[in-house]
Amino acid sequence: MADIEDRWLSVDEISKYLGVSSDTVYRWINKHNMPAHRMGRLWKFKREQVDAWIEAGGANSANPTSGYRKNSTGQ
């Protein structure tokens, strides 16, 4: 059962987990380097990475310096 808890979460799942809209999640990815990984057309998240990002200041930081954001081209 530990495998299920460590799975990749979708935008809808992470937005429900955080209690925000999916639009907010997309904004955080683009403007605040929310830890997200692009898999084809979909964004996926690891709960532990998102928790650490929030604890480090997350979307509250004016100048995000996190290097988590990645997409299929490695950018």
Image (cartoon, helix red, strand yellow):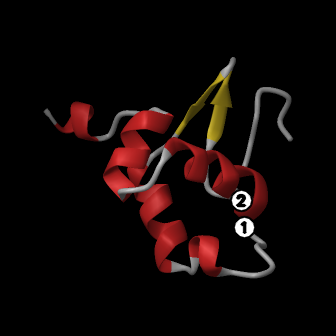
Q: Position of residue 48 (x, y in %)?
A: 41, 57
Depicted 32 relative to depicted 14: above or below: below
Residue type at the position of mark 1: Ser
Which quadrant does the C terminus fall into?
Answer: top right
What secondary structure is found at the residue carrying circle 1? loop
**Which residue is disc 1 drawn over?**
66
Q: Position of residue 4 (x, y in %)?
A: 23, 31
Q: Position of residue 5 (x, y in %)?
A: 24, 40
In whole angstroms, how far apart are the C-alphas of marks 1 and 2?
6 Å
Which quadrant does the N terminus fall into?
Answer: top left
Residue type at the position of mark 2: Asn
Depicted 62 relative to depicted 69: above or below: below
Q: Position of residue 26 (x, y in %)?
A: 64, 45
Label 2 environment density (alpha carbons within 10 Å; few <14, some 14–19, many ≥20)? many
> Residue placed at 85% from the left, 29% from the top?
73
> Residue placed at 81% from the left, 79% from the top?
63
Depicted 4 relative to depicted 32: above or below: above
Residue at far top of view: 40
69 lies left or right of 8: right
Between 50 and 61, the residue placed more toward the observer is 61
Query: What label sits on residue 45 in the rendered view?
Result: none
**Which residue is disc 2 drawn over?**
33
Mark 1 touches mark 2? (CB < 8 Å): yes
